Amino acid sequence: MNKSEKTKYIQFSLTVSEGKWLIAYAISQMQSIRHAMENGKIIFKGGTTVSCVAELLTGTPLRICGRISRRGAVSSRIREGAAHSLLYSQGRITDIDEDYEDRILELGAEDIMITGANIIDIHGNAAMLAGSPAGNRCGRGVSAMTVEGAKVFIAAGLEKLIPGSVHDSIKNARRKGIDSSRGMACGLFPVIGELVTELEAIKEISNVSVIPIGKGGIAGAEGSCLFQAWGSESEITRLEAVLNLCYGKDISGNAESLMECSFPCAGCREHLSCGYKHGVSAFIQK
């Protein structure tokens, strides 16, 4: 910081959706991402935060599969249309849903994998929910994410932060043997990479100090986070310029895929213990 510049302090809140876009803007301007855009490959693994990144870098939102809604852990009503996993290479985008595992194995040291997570902890560990057998193609391909040398970014907002250990959650979560579930029963598998939350995003965007000072919210701001940041006026101005791009932005994702599953649907054959499938009336939203 220039000694002549006075330290400026700001406080600002981000809804969950706004936080996703902040993370996406930060990732999109990383030097390693820009290098991969010009010289390598990038795989975007579907999820709402990663969809924000894909929109910014390729103009293409992703198909969203599993999600947690007011009805519990549910899936998309459709399984077709837009790509859930997308490959960017030499200016071209390719739907790789049918050969996801093989395409991951093609990644090398100059390439990037961008994925999300469903839970994170204070140690930087992350895990993803699996409602389908072995986590479907993503679960089966997860070990390949880091094996071939590609850099993995895990884009996950602070709403995913749990009070305990991700490892403990993985050890105890299960798909099978659940007596009842409000939505599909889920297990967890670990995701290894560099975690990018709103805190890392802010520091990537500008040279400031930042701490969270509040969490929660009502009236559509549930899960929001209140931050305090401070630094030189020029760096705060740089941060505020990106924040203004995020304020008011809604969820990213292919519009049709944002519609939830309902019984019966294509996922019913593989989802376990689902209260909607088994007619547990207490779980059915009136």
Image (cartoon, rainbow, N blue to C red):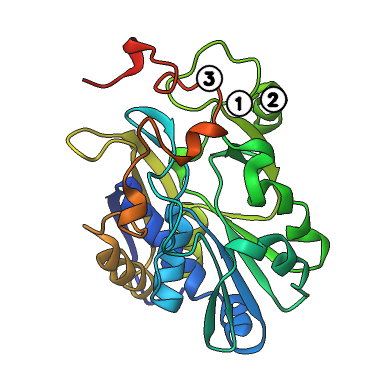
- How busy is the neighbourhood of tag 2: few (under 14 within 10 Å), some, or many (20 plus)? few
Between label 2 and label 1, give the one nearer the viewer.
Answer: 2
For image coordinates 58% across by 37% down, the residue present is 129
Give residue 168's mark. Answer: 2
Can residue 2 be seen here? The reply is no
Q: Position of residue 184 (x, y in %)?
A: 50, 28
Q: Kindly identify the amino acid type of the residue bearing the numbered disc 2.
A: Asp
Along the line of sight, which residue is nearer the eye, 144 or 117? Answer: 144
Q: Is residue 9 left or right of residue 57?
A: left
Upstream in the sequence, badge 3 or badge 1? 1
Give residue 88's mark. Answer: none
For image coordinates 61% across by 73% down, the residue present is 42
In the image, is residue 3 above or below residue 169? below
Give residue 164's mark. Answer: 1
Q: Position of residue 107 (x, y in %)?
A: 74, 72
The residue indicated by pointer 3 is: 273
Q: Kindly identify the amino acid type of the residue bearing the numbered disc 3.
A: Ser
